[in-house]
Image: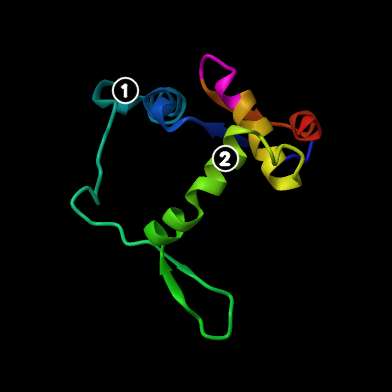
């Protein structure tokens, strides 16, 4: 009863979500959908990771991924971390999300218990 109303959705399904929301909350927009605007399409992304050490080192994410990449890819491909709590929950969520034709997942107390 007090559970949060939370839904995970594959980003590729956003047009369906816009239509559903408009149908119930702003039907005057139905003829204009889907609305697609990328306000940052020309902006270059610069992503950095901050090291937790005393020096407060900054590492570009591309460099970090290059250094860690093969290990991370192998862990994912071989499912070596399937029993790690956070990663295992994420994998279970992904399995449920992509196992549904709509690629949408409503989070319920029952689904959380399965993860």
Q: Magenta stretch?
A: 97-102
Is residue 48 in the magenta section?
no
- Looking at the rendering, which quadrant does residue 92 occupy? top right
Which residue is pictured at 59% across the width and 18% down the height?
99
Mark 1 lies on a secondary structure that is helix
> Is 13 positioned to the left or the right of 30 in the image?
right
> Is 84 positioned to the left or the right of 12 in the image?
right
Task: Tell me the residue that label 2 is attached to.
Answer: 74
Which residue is pictured at 42% across the width and 69% down the height?
59
**Which quadrant, please, contains the N terminus?**
top right
Looking at the picture, tell me which residue is in the foreground, 111 or 93. Answer: 93
Which residue is pictured at 30% across the width and 28% down the height?
29
Task: Tell me the residue that label 1 is attached to.
Answer: 30
Viewer-nearest of discs 2 and 1: 2
Instruction: Say above or below: 18 vs 101.
Output: below
**Which quadrant, please, contains the C terminus?**
top right
Q: Whole-percent x and y of residue 103?
A: 52, 22
Who comes first in sequence, dot 2 or dot 1? 1
């Amino acid at each position: 009863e007090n559970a949060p109303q939370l839904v995970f959705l594959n980003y590729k399904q956003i047009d369906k979500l816009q239509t559903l929301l408009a149908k119930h909350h702003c039907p005057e927009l139905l003829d204009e959908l889907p609305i697609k605007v990328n306000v940052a399409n020309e902006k270059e992304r610069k992503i950095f990771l901050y090291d937790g050490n005393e020096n407060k080192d900054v590492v570009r994410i591309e460099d970090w991924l290059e250094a860690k990449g093969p290990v991370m890819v192998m862990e994912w491909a071989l499912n070596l971390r399937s029993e790690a709590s956070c990663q295992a929950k994420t994998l279970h969520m992904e399995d449920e999300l992509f196992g549904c034709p709509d690629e949408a997942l409503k989070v319920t107390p029952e689904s959380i218990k399965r993860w």
